[in-house]
Image (cartoon, coloured by chain):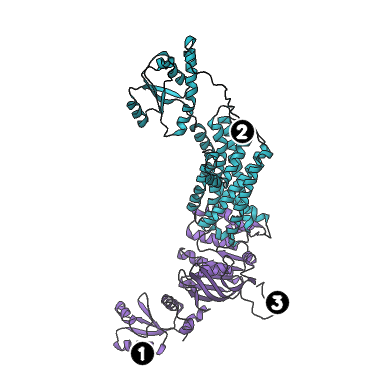
Chain colours: A purple, B cyan
Amino acid sequence: MSVEAPGDNLPPAPAITVTGLSKRFGDKLVVDGLDMAVPRGSIYGFLGPNGSGKTTTIRMMCGLLTPDAGSGQCLGFDIRTEALKIKEQVGYMTQKFSLYEDLSIRENLDFIARMYQVPGRRERVEAALADLGLSDRKNQLAGTLSGGWKQRMALAACLLHDPKLLLLDEPTAGVDPKARREFWDEIRRLSARGVTVLVSTHYMDEAAQCDFIAYIAYGKKLIDGPAAEIPAMIGLHTWRVDGPDLAKLEVELKDTNGVEQVARFGAVLHVSGTDGPVLEAIAKSHVARGTHHWQEKKAELEEAFIFLMAGAKDNFVAPEARKS
Amino acid sequence: MSGFSAGRFMAVLIKEFIQMRRDRVTFAMIIGVPIMQLILFGYAINSDPKNLPTLVEMADSGPVARAVISGMANSEYFDFIGVVTGIGEGEEALRSGRANFVVVIPPHFERDIIRRQSPSLLLVADASDPTAAAGAVGAMNAIVDVAMREVLIGPLAAAARAPPPFSVIVHRQFNPEGRTSTNIVPGLLAIILSMTMVMITAIAIVREAEKGTMETLIATPVRPIEVMMGKIIPYVLMGYLQTAVFLLAAQQMFAVPFEGSAFAFFVGFNLYLLVNLALGFLISTVARNQMQAMQISFFTLLPTILLSGFMFPFAGMPGWAQTIGTAIPATHFLRLVRKVMLKGAGMADVSGDMMAIAIIMIVIVTAALLRYRQTLD
């Protein structure tokens, strides 16, 4: 990576650090005292339900919105005072397609390249069109493209100026699974080249692709850390249950004290709780009935997020309280 | 603003031109509106109407009465469509709109004139539309006088009214034929420019916000001044094109003169164009979507048409309306255009109007810049 600190083995400064970031729209506190650090070169997943403040946070990080409180740096520039310098090195892909529908694909890319004053603009744009596989359709109006193509084109547009940091706001919303997979392949290639990627999503399979994850709800961060450690941080214990008449069992388990979550995955139930011994006792009592097969499993991200989302609904349980 | 980049400014400019070219409907409107308005206002509006349907009740059909009637017909104001018996029938015709005037020649009209008993000739006018009746009513006395003098000759000449001791000569300056189109057409330029320029600018900018492209735009390192200039200059050129079409059509169709200084016109026109674009920009900072932008633009258009002196004489408005009218840029541009085109005015004659437009522009531009944000807040 080119921007590493001159000091020999010091870890590079994070691409983004924010502390106490807050934003209010009218009476509504949309982002509330958010602390976050995005390590350089990582893929950082930003998760949370709709309206939890993900978009607002991303906009504050790249200088599109001014925070009401808090401070932060992005690529070494102050997010309050050096927005223009941040903009030059950041590629930002909006949630909604926001290139010009009445311009052709080539005209759109050319416009963006001019905006960033990309050297060798023509060649760069032609190369981007070739990479996209859109060279023969470059004069087609962007508005006539399908959702998947629009998304690929938007990604190509925000890569034209070789940004050091990519901010992707729900990039795969409304895109078919094949296009999503290809999109993530591209993200991993970029990450391998040293580009830092901050991506917001609410697809759990996408969360699993991230190196780090932060989960926010109601503008507050509930938890963050390396993706693999999230379930352990929550302290979730999970049992896998299969057997006949799962629907009835599901209802029964949901009313059982000590069971905090019952999630159905196809023909099995994942029964989770934060108190391991209590859950084990419940499991044993059910095993004694002999109707179902119970087996303890490692809690995965999937369970972790269902758990977080359920918790987010009944206001906040402080993340500390969860990490029992 | 530091770091102005000609490259980025050109990028915005090129983009606007491409979008303008793709938006055929708007382009057609820019060219079509001036021509259509010219035809409608220029040909259709006449504030001195002729050939108004008139009924006559003749209780005396002697030569004097007939001379009055033919004098009225010759004036072209009155078009006799029939005879009524009794005033009731005449009033019914006025109410139903069949006639605009009823002339009542009283019994023994001729005899009473000869006897010098000053009989009354009644002209009943439908004054529900004062403008329609005014010209004809104003001409009536002169018509009767002329008719009297033609028919009462010889020994009867003394019965005709004596000529007044002095005569008033009215000299219609700048528009000797009193043609309505000569007055309306130059003023129309002010209205057309404010109609199209304000709305198109407001919509073009709000469209970026509404479609979400504004977010892409301000996520790039572009500076506000580059966006503002890149967006406004294409519309300045539009305004030039529109005005060229308008002036050509005005001259070809209505032979409206252009007596004054072309330079004064050019300076005033550019000022007025900028004021309208700035107003459009200001509206775009208030409106949330294209629909609202259009509505607010229309809202500003109404006082422009009614209080600027375009439709109704400015001097005839009450003080408060004149105060509002003075704050409207079209009021001053209208005066400037009429002075230059019809009265042969030069720079010195219109500097006051230019000053007024410039002051309004400073206020609007300040308000627009205060409201414009570089962020999405």
Q: Earlier in the sequence, mark 3 or mark 1?
A: 3
Q: Mark 2 and mark 1 in contact (Cβ < 8 Å)?
A: no
Residue A6 circle label: 3
Residue B111 seen in the current view: yes
Q: Is residue A31 above or below residue B251?
A: below
* Along the line of sight, the residue nearer the viewer: B285 or B342: B342
Left or right: B152, with B182 as reference point: left
Residue at the disc numbered 1: A281
**Same chain letter for marks 1 and 2:** no
Horizontal and vertical percent position of residue A100:
54, 55
Q: Residues within 10 Å of mark 3 (few under 14, many from 20)?
A: few
Q: Residues within 10 Å of mark 1 (few under 14, many from 20)?
A: few
Horizontal and vertical percent position of residue A305:
45, 76
Q: Residue drawn at (55%, 40%), measured in percent from left and top?
A: B314
Horizontal and vertical percent position of residue A68:
56, 70
Residue at the disc numbered 2: B342
User: How much space separates mark 3 and mark 2, taking CA atoms?
Assistant: 76 Å
Q: Residue furthest top?
A: B154
Host chain of mark 1: A
Which element carries disc 1, helix, strand or loop? Answer: helix
* Along the line of sight, the residue nearer the viewer: B337 or A297: B337
Amino acid beneath label 1? Ala
**Same chain letter for marks 3 and 1:** yes
Between circles 3 and 2, the one closer to the viewer is 2
Which element carries disc 3, helix, strand or loop? Answer: loop
Amino acid beneath label 2? Leu
Horizontal and vertical percent position of residue B54:
40, 24
Residue A1 circle label: none
